[in-house]
Amino acid sequence: MLLGFKTELKLNNKQRTRVLKHCGVARHGWNWGLALTKQILDHNKLNPKQKIKFPSAIDLHKWLVALVKPENPWYFEVSKCAPQYALRDLRTAWDRCFKRVSGVPKFKKKGKSDSFELDGTIKICGSRKIQLPRLGVLKTYENLPQVKPKSATISRTANRWYISFKIEVEPSDTPKAVDAVGVDLGVKSLATLSTGEVFEGAKPYRQLEAKLSRLQWLNRHKQIGSANWKKAQRQIAKLHQRIANIRSYSLHKLTTYLAKNHGVIVIEDLNVSGLMANRKLAKAIADMGFYEFRRQLEYKTKLYGSSLMVVNRFYPSSKTCSQCGTKKEFLSLQERVFKCEHCSFECNRDLNAAINLKNAVSHTVSACGVDSADVATVKQENFSLLANVSKL
């Protein structure tokens, strides 16, 4: 299976200038293509009888070479792949917009989400060097896998440059300590397992919120574009990156532990966008990273030979007693201990939900959101109430 590898680059001033030129050309190509495609859509809307065929990525690149490059000689200072891949990404963005998967593409601004993609002769030179077309040999801070990548993407985050490419990894079937486990995600603690283990969330935004607010408050009256404003923007971006790195590290540790040590992992199909609409809980939910938790589990279960089961979001895991199966009509968020009125069972609310998730059968869906009836292969496991979905 293919996995993405990403590491930080160690650039000098000349290399940084070359990389910035590539980002500028890629951004210019994107903005030119977006303006042109919007004009075509407006023309087709006003003149339905004289419609112009919406251009493909190849058409856009041909027009770019014929119309834009002769008027902008600085296009020839960088690799042709930078604007070419930018136009491919633009066409993909329009396809997603037409299918109503995402919104209308937006114009790119200098200094925000700078990135570009290259292909061609890419070689790994030694342990910490990589050779790229038009950029030469670039150094990295960590060892690189000895592979031959077909393409590579260079991006910037908080004034740091990163390179990423895909590598082929063979899945490994690691020995599992537990056959099946239910995982209940929460705001107070990140994850509660049906085995009784509780993993506290890092909550990096909550820890660094005061410092971030202070930096933003000091930056409120600085003149936009000045040296002090740029310096403050770099400090704020670095702090945002630190928050994201802490959150990502904690999620990677938890998801790797689950995928390596459990044969079947059962989670709930949470409506994260709906939960974020609650203004009282949105900040805490975003700080936990529920969507990233599920995304990492989806590929790590394939990598380590385990299975991921997703329970339907309407399954009442918190309101149902894990001992007798009695369902409560109402359960407030303040009740942290589940008390069953039918069998007098008392248990931690999150632990009770995790046990119910492990015992769920008829409410499972695949990781892509398909009902259990549509899953191609179902294999019976040792645990009588679980189904191991082999293709997720």
Image (cartoon, rainbow, N blue to C red):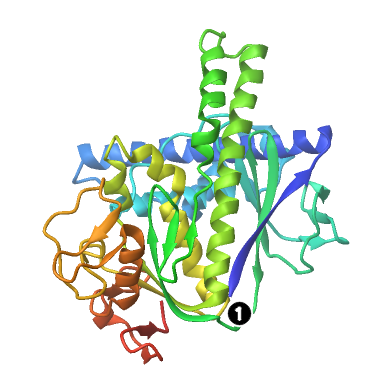
- Tell whether 331 sits left or right of 207: left
Q: Is residue 77 above or below residue 147?
A: above
Q: Is residue 41 above or below residue 214?
A: below
Residue 124 appears in the picture as rendered: yes
Q: Which residue is mark 1?
A: 171
Q: Nearer the viewer, residue 36 or 368?
A: 368
Q: Position of residue 182 (x, y in %)?
A: 39, 70
Residue 52 appears in the picture as rendered: no
Q: Amino acid at mark 1?
A: Pro
Q: Residue at x 41, y 49 (%)?
A: 93
Q: Nearer the viewer, residue 345 or 30?
A: 345
Would you identify the image quadrant in which residue 364 lies?
A: bottom left
- Tell whether 105 sits left or right of 23: left
Would you identify the image quadrant in which residue 224 lies?
A: top right
Q: Nearer the viewer, residue 228 or 110?
A: 228
The furthest residue to the front = 344
Is the N terminus in the top left, top right, bottom left or bottom right quadrant?
bottom right
Q: Position of residue 104 (x, y in %)?
A: 34, 42
Q: Residue at x 50, y 36 (%)?
A: 205
Determine crowd level at label 1: few under 14, some 14-19, many 20+ residues with C-alpha closer than 10 A: some
Q: Is residue 100 above or below residue 30?
A: below
Q: Residue at x 39, y 37 (%)?
A: 283
Is the C terminus in the top left, top right, bottom left or bottom right quadrant?
bottom left
- Tell whether 381 sits left or right of 341: right
The furthest residue to the left = 329
Q: Position of residue 102 (x, y in %)?
A: 34, 48
Q: Secondary structure beneath disc 1?
A: loop
Q: Is residue 349 above or below residue 267?
A: above
Would you identify the image quadrant in which residue 235 lies?
A: top right
